[in-house]
Amino acid sequence: MTQEYKGACLCGAVQLSAKARSHKIGACHCNMCRKWTGGPFLATDCGTDVTFSAEDMISRYDSSEWAERGFCKQCGSHLFYFLKEAQQYIVSAGLFEQQDDFIFDHQIFIDKKPAFYDFSNATHNMTEAEVFAQHVPGEE
């Protein structure tokens, strides 16, 4: 039997279910994520098999040619970063009920992180150029 990982936004209007969920948590320090969340975006890769209870309560913002961001229309909770070509959901870690197995292990756009905060965890760090070279078509 496949485990389902469940979660919800702050007000509960949008509930989600993911068939797969990485136990690895990453922080994104890019300018857009920091504007969107007020700090780094802490998220986990949930792949392509994610369902939402109320699609009509989700606003999707086309933040780039390759990705969009989703949030709850009612409470504003940040729900996901969606990679269009791969149809892949990177879901906000705080939404999940089960969080005991999470491990904070990577940071991206580390060269964009402001000096006023640091995480003490030892993580794999990637610069903006390294992220684009690995994940964005035509951005090498």
Image (cartoon, rainbow, N blue to C red):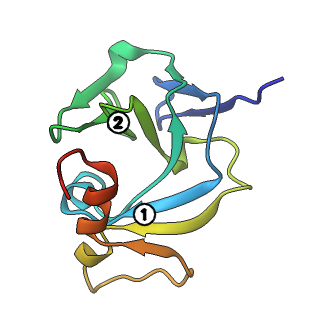
Q: Which residue is mark 2?
A: 82
| Residue closest to the eye, 42 or 38 | 42
Of mark 1 and mark 2, the one earlier in the sequence is 1
Q: Quadrant of residue 76?
A: top left
At 30% across and 66% down in the image, what residue appears?
130
**Residue 37 versus residue 90 in the image, above or below:** below
Q: Residues within 10 Å of mark 1 (few under 14, many from 20)?
A: many
User: The residue under label 1 is which amino acid type?
Assistant: Ala
Q: Quadrant of residue 65?
A: top left
Secondary-structure class at tag 2: strand
Secondary-structure class at tag 1: strand
Picture coordinates of residue 12, whole percent (x, y) = 51, 28
Q: How many marks?
A: 2
User: The residue under label 2 is which amino acid type?
Assistant: Phe
Picture coordinates of residue 62, whole percent (x, y) = 17, 33
**Do labels 1 and 2 touch, CB within 8 Å?**
no
**Residue 83 versus residue 19 in the image, above or below:** below
Q: Residues within 10 Å of mark 2 (few under 14, many from 20)?
A: many
Which quarter shows the N terminus?
top right
User: Which circle marks residue 134 in the picture?
Assistant: none
Which quarter shows the C terminus?
bottom left
At 47% across and 80% down in the image, what residue appears?
119
Q: How far apart are the alpha carbons under marks 1 and 2?
A: 15 Å
**Residue 95 versus residue 34 in the image, above or below:** above
User: Which circle marks residue 27 in the picture?
Assistant: 1
Q: Quadrant of residue 90?
A: top left
Picture coordinates of residue 38, whole percent (x, y) = 28, 60
Picture coordinates of residue 77, whole percent (x, y) = 38, 40
| Residue closest to the eye, 49 or 79 | 49
At 53% across and 84% down in the image, what residue appears?
120
| Residue closest to the eye, 74 or 50 | 50
At 60% across and 57% down in the image, what residue appears?
24
